Structures are given as structure tokens and as C-alpha cells.
Amino acid sequence: MHLEGFFWVTPLLAAHALGSPHPVPVHQYPARQTTPYAPKQPPLTTPWTDKVGTNPWPEYPRPQLERADWQNLNGVWQYQNAADLNAVDSPPFGQSLAQEVLVPSCLESGLSGAASPSVHGAVTTKFTVPTSWDQNVLLHFGAVDYEATVFINGKQAGFNRGGYFHFTVDATEYISKDGDNELLVFVHDPTDSGGNVIPIGKQRIVPSHIFYTPCSGIWQSVWIESAPENHIDLLDLDANMDGEVNIYVHSSTGASTPVEVSVFDGEDEVASHEGSSDEAFSFSVSDVKLWSPDSPTLYNVTVRMGDDEIQSYTGFRTISKGEVNGVVRPLLNGEFTFMFGTLDQGYWPDGLYTAPTREAMVYDLEVLKDLGFNMVRKHIKVEPALFYRACDELGMLVIQDMPSLIPLQNVLPNEEQQTEFARQLEVLINQFKSFPSIVTWIIYNEGWGQLTDSHPEFGLTDRVRELDPSRLISSTSGWVDHGAGDFSDNHHYANPQCGSPFYSNPSSPYDPSRIGLQGEFGGIGQNVSIEHLWNVQAAIDTVIETYELDETVEAWNYRSHILLGELQDQIRRFACSGGVWTQTTDVEGEVNGLMTYDRRVKRTDQEQWRADIQGLYDAAAARSE
Ligand SMILES: *[C@@H]1O[C@H](CO)[C@@H](O)[C@H](O)[C@H]1NC(C)=O
Ligand SMILES: *[C@@H]1O[C@H](CO)[C@@H](O)[C@H](O)[C@H]1NC(C)=O
């Protein structure tokens, strides 16, 4: 697994506890030849593989908290594997590492240039800070899977645990304004190895059919920006159908500081309000244009706090539940809105968790929008902020899953692991609750990692509700339902059982006190020729495990039509308020996508699918009359 014994761990250096400053190791390391960056041929490419280059993801990564003075650190860094976790105590400062890799990328992906499984390793780069910057320097990581220990110029400057979330290191005291700064990140990602029960979603050290290649390392953008010492750390922004803006500005010092908020419709300032940081306040905007999938109107927002000024945006909409003609329904802006989406996993054959480009990432959403889908269920993965920005702009509702713990062989979390799962769930809600497109949170998928005797979903649902009272919660999507949350969420393949008076074990009967949702169905597959398949024999061997295989695209479209017709029937007859079709694309050994894994083939008969999806909305509208 590791390439050689790079880390010469002396007892002296190994004795340094995490958190203590790390001196430059006293031993002289042999000069090393660094292998230059070159993408490795992935088992399957996409139309964007060749467009990635060495300046990936140039876009500003955090559209809801954007500062003018920033610098992207994405690009070619150096990397080498480490023997074990203890290597964090003797990082290879001031050295050339074994090979160049691309940041951001998963170290297991072809695009990384490493394409080798990794559990621990160091990645380094050098950066300079513009001499014109005379404020604090913030170092941002979009996401690093799973643990990151950050060293700047040989000193430990930060640590983060959790593979899906943004974190910031205030680099000010560690950096030098003249010349190069050395940034070294030690990453540790056990995935499902070594008795670890951590949020990993579909990643597995040994992939098999519905479980895929893992992602380790810096898989989202890294950047620095200039901000005053007391700066805005986080902005909670919720705007509703009544024109009310609810806002909470979190400052870095936590000291109550005056803030000024302005809301813009294009160039026109339509409201401004003064308040204080570190406390909630609200104000109203009159005659707002509402946000919805059909009309995804967004408003720019500027927030000033002392010398700090950031750009953000919001959309005015309200998600709630209520009875319509005797059935509990999800309401968007007060009206029953049938939510129809795909199970959207966000995997790429060339980049795994990291889409090759923003354009590629948005392409998936545009394909869905074009067919008439108004929703995606982001399945046990969390995307970069720019994904949610794209959903906000395109008008795609998002049902967001918490990444699951390992579900295998009834491996359940111990108390400490459960506490960490709950902590990361809170981070998910706090970091993503300002995106207008997200309308529902899912805590557990199909009982994976869900303690069954203590029913933790009740407490977690209360906690999510406390952190974000503005959205709906599917506490258990599929299977182990004890009555928590807003949805009675059925999973069934291939045909749906949506709000219906029939169900199959281990799902539960439809509960009329909650919203009837088909959280997963479909999943029908159709095998394709090798040039569109993930060319890994172990994955190809699992194609047969697909829920159903249709021998031709015509047969697949025929079966799709039957299944969408069944769902439509259930909307007319029963209490079905939304559905999730498995899935957007093929993934590794699964061949049940609307598109192949390389996005080069669409299986969908466009006209038939558009008509069938419209039929669902029409059937739902008839139930609102
Ligand atoms: C928000 O501001 C950006 C420029 O910062 C502009 O490109 C965009 O059109 C604005 N959006 C709206 C909805 O006004
Ligand atoms: C799927 O297709 C691949 C070749 O493209 C083939 O090797 C494999 O055997 C097929 N599997 C099934 C179950 O048809």
C-alpha cells in the first residue's frame, strides 16, 4: 500500500503529540526524484477528462460567502504515501515528495495522477501571499477526506475530521509575506478498514456492485483569502415566501459587531437593514419574486461587518407540510408540489468524488432538468457548494442525505462513533442550510448504521429541526421506520409502493400522518458495450446483480414507461407525494442510469420520458383541485 518507508520516525519526533508545534526533522533525507504529474488512464473517461488540465476548478468555491481578495491554490502539488498514522508526527518538511498529484482530486482517481489506494499520506504545495494583502490570511479547504492535519511552514496550523465539509485555518501567524510558504497536509482516510465506523457513503476499500472505489485526500478546492481579523465566518440566510429574511452573521471573534445587509434585484437595492453579528435578526422585502423550480429567482445579498464585506445570495421560498384534500403533502410556497427526482450519487469515472469540471457537474443537472425532473436526491454524499449554487440557479429541489456509516454485517457504531456521526450531521446542516434549493434532509438511508434498539433517529430529528426549522426531514429513508420525521418513505425495486395500501418487508405500511414518498424505485438496468463500462473486471462481474437487466434500450424504455405509469397511478389513487428514480448515471458495476457512467450515452427516449414525467405532475395537480 505504501511505496517505501518515507518517514523516518525517531522516538523523539514520534513523541510529539498532535497539536504541538512540529520541528523540522533533524535527519537528512536522501534527495528524491519527484515523478511529474500526468493523469493516469482511468478505467473509463468522460467528455471532460481531457479538459481538466493543471488549473482545475478555477471558480470561486464558496458562492454564499464570497470575498474579493482571494487566490486559488488548486493545481499540481506533491504527494507521497506514509507508512502509518504515526507519520503525522514527522512530516516531510522542506523535501521533495515522491510524485506530483492534482489538487483537488481523490488520490484513487485517474485524474489525481496517483491512482493508487491510500490510507495515509502527505501532500504539499508552496504558495505566496500577495504583498498587497494587509489583513489576516484565511486558508480554506472545500473538503478533505477523511482527516486533515494542516502544517504551514513546519508548524501545525489546523486539524479537521469529516470528509465532506468545509474548514478554515487562520494562517496569519504561520505565513510569511515575502517568499514561499510551505503548506503540508497530512491526510488519513481509513474508509471502512480497521474497525472504523465513520460517515463514508458508498466508498469501500473493496468495492462491490452498489459500493464503489473510495476517495481519499483533498477532493475539493483549496484557496486563501484576505479578511480582517474580525471577519464573517459563516452566514445563515433563510428567505421565505412572505418576503421575510432571517439572518445570523457568525463572526470569527464572537463579539457582537454591527452589520449591514443589502438585498439586490439585479442592480437595484430592494432592501437594506442593520443588525448585529452573533444574534438572529429579520427584516422584510416587499413584492418579492418567489423561488421555485419553474422560476428560480435569486437575489444578491451583500453583508458588511466592520471592515469585512462579503457577497452572498438567496431565494425567497417556503417549504412546509399541510393537508390538501385530506392528504398530508409537501408544500412549496403553500402549494402541493410533487417532487420527482433521481438518486444522484455524484460519481465520476475519471474523478470519482470530484467532477472533472464544473461544466461536467452542471451537465448532469441540465440533462435531468431537460427531461422534466424538478428534484435530485443527493445520495449519501455531499457536493461542493457550487453544486448547490447550480441547483439554486437551475431550479432543482434537493433532498440531501447525510453520508451513511458502513452498513455491512450489522456493524453498528459504538457510543463514540455515534456521537461523531451526530456531530457531522450538525456540521452538514449548519454548512448547507442557506441554499434555497435544499428542501429536505435525510438522516438515515435503509437502516445503514442506524442503531435499532435505541431509535436514535428521534433525537437526531429533533436536533436537525432545532438547527433548521425551515425544512422537512426524512428521518429514515427506506426500511427501519419507527415513526420519526415528516415522511413515510418507501424504497422498493423495481416498482413503486408510494403512499399505497401495500408494502414489502423491510419497509413499513404507509403512515397517513406523514408525507408518502417513494424514496427509491426503478433501478432497471441495461448492459452496454465495454467502451462505456467501468473497465474493471470485478465490477463487470457484478453487472448481473443489477435489480433488473433489460436486453435492449427499447426494452429499458418500455419498462421505464410501465414503472412511471405505476407511479402515476399511485398518485391518482393513493397518497403519493414524490418519487426518486434510481438513478442519474451508471456507477462502476451498476448499469441502471439514465445515462452511462461516462455520460456519453443517454438511455432515455426523450419524448416518452418527458411525457411520462409531465403525467406525474398532472396527476398530482388533479389531486389539489
Ligand atoms: C449577482 O451579482 C453578480 C455579480 O457579482 C451578477 O453577475 C449576477 O447577475 C447578480 N445576480 C442577480 C440575481 O442579481
Ligand atoms: C455486460 O457487458 C460486458 C461487456 O460490455 C460483458 O463483459 C459482461 O459479461 C456483461 N454482463 C452481463 C450480465 O450481461
Image (spheres, rainbow, N blue to C red):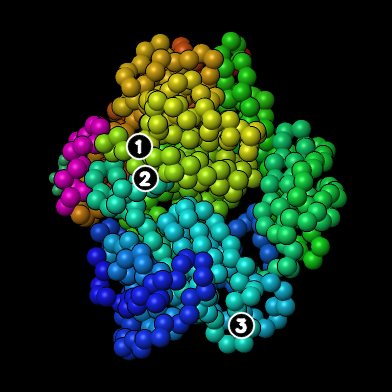
**Mark 2 → mark 3, Cα distance in angstroms:** 40 Å
* Residue at the spot 79% in from the left edge and 59% down from the top edge: 305
N-terminal of the pair, mark 1 or mark 3, is 3
- Which x, y percent locates residue 59? 56, 64
x and y, in percent, of residue 350 in the image: 34, 60
Q: Earlier in the sequence, mark 2 or mark 3?
A: 3
Using the image, tell me which numbered label, if any, was put on residue 197. Answer: 2
Q: What residue is shown with label 1?
A: 412
Query: Residue type at mark 3?
Result: Ser
Mark 1 vs mark 2, CA separation in Å: 7 Å
Real-space CA distance between mark 1 and mark 3, rounded to the nearest whole angstrom: 46 Å
- Give the secondary structure at mark 1: loop
Residue 132 falls in which quadrant of the image?
bottom right
423, 473: nearer the viewer: 423
Magenta stretch: give its range: 537-552
* Residue on which the image places disc 3: 176
Question: Left or right of 212: which side holds 243?
Answer: right
Placement of the C terminus among the 4 image quadrants: top right
Camera sees residue 460: yes
The label nearer to you, 2 versus 3, is: 2
Of the numbered discs 1 and 2, the one sitting upstream in the chain is 2
- Residue occupying the point 47% across, 45% down: 420
Front-lying residue, 107 or 534: 107
Q: Which amino acid, mark 2?
A: Val
Judge from the rendering whether residue 359 lies leftward or rightward of residue 232; answer left or right. Answer: left
Residue at image x 69%, y 41%?
238
- Is 550 in the magenta? yes
In this view, the mark in front (1 or 3)? 1
**Mark 1 and mark 2 residues within 8 Å of each other at the beta carbon:** yes
